Amino acid sequence: MSAQQRLRRALRRPSVLLVVLTLVVAGLIRVLAPGAADVPTASPAAVQESGCADVLFVGVDGRGEAPVPGGFFGPTLTVLHSRYTALTSSSLWSLETRRVSFSGQELSVLKTKARGPADEVVTPRSAKRWARGLSGAATRAAALIRAAAADCPQQQIVLAGYSQGAGAVHRALLELRANRRITERITAAVLVADPDRAGHGVLNRLTTPVPGVPPRGALYPVLNICAKGDVICDFGPTSIREAFRAHNSYRSTRAGALRGVAGKVFVRTTKHPKPSTNPLTLDLEVSRPVRQYLGVDVAAESRPHLRFATRATLPPGVLLSDRGLLSGVPVTPGTWTVLYTVRNTEAPEFSRKVPGFLVIVVNRSGTGTISTGGGQTCP
């Protein structure tokens, strides 16, 4: 196997590709220019074959819910996940889904007597029994996210949990709070009936409370969905029968609220820029002016806030502005591999730099054609 073949195989690994992207953007590795030899470059195949979806959806069930037939999650999280999946599948964002294996105890273990107000029927002892295994699920969720983040360093992350699963996601967020490289990629967390909800959750009220989420300094939102009187997230004097009914209502009478939250999460997803990857090649021609914006998938309202940067060598006569405009008149034929970053300056939570990739081929006068290369002629 040649050195070039070994390099191409290595670049198919996301971790290696990220290092190359980082070194190029930092100016520590030069990119391909006419006459250059033995220069490490990332190929379009390396980007496209990384196997990483744009978004990772991690969910944790609770209340004894098992995955529905043909689905990933129990009935409650399925409402949320199905809507989010429908939105991403109709757009340009690919989705990977992972379930943290944890079913949780049924609500019945909370009861110490058949009737009465929830805050008299449920005791600290029965609450701890109901929460058995929750901390382990939180640790597994955090470990899954760490592993996925290492494999796919540019992937957005969406978290969701219901009942004990919401508590597991809550605690996983606390476990990950010191890892900025992971938390800056969390688009949102959705907690449906969080038992650790500050001041109201059953575990917050009856056991040693854990800190609230999101932690101070986090850039992602935590979207709480809690029905009034729910025995788990709005623990209080509601009758135990009504409190149980409220907790079981999210997949039916409150399904609209779950779908609405899925829509909000999707809007946030689209505000993170995604450089276009098909096609990756821009064909230019010597002495023929070019005015081409780099292609980036992003919400329309966020496009004016995009900012680009590169330290790559561009074809002589061609410039890349901070708004992503390639312009000028090429003067030298050849091939250039251009690595760049793009970020959304609309708000701090969307400002993470995302690497992009483009190959510019400058043909001799009269021999080439102009290709959009995933770009556009106006911002």
Image: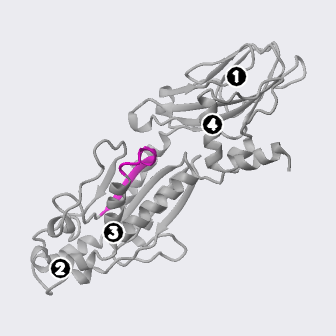
Cα separation, mark 4 vs mark 3, equals 37 Å
Q: Look at 28% across and 74% down and name the residue there.
A: 131
In the displayed structure, does residue 281 sit left or right of residue 57?
right
Q: Which residues are magenta?
A: 177-192
| Residue 28 place in picture, x, y as percent | 63, 29
Picture residue at 62% right of the left edge, 33% below the top: 23
Mark 2 residue type: Arg
Residue with the mark numbered 1: 313
Mark number for residue 195?
none
In the rendered image, which residue does mark 3 sit on?
135
Residue matched to label 2: 125
Report the residue marked by disc 4.
21
User: Does 47 sit above or below residue 64?
Assistant: above
Q: Residue furthest right?
A: 367
Q: Secondary structure at mark 2?
A: helix
Q: Is residue 278 left or right of residue 272?
A: right
Asked whether 159 falls inside the magenta stretch, the response is no
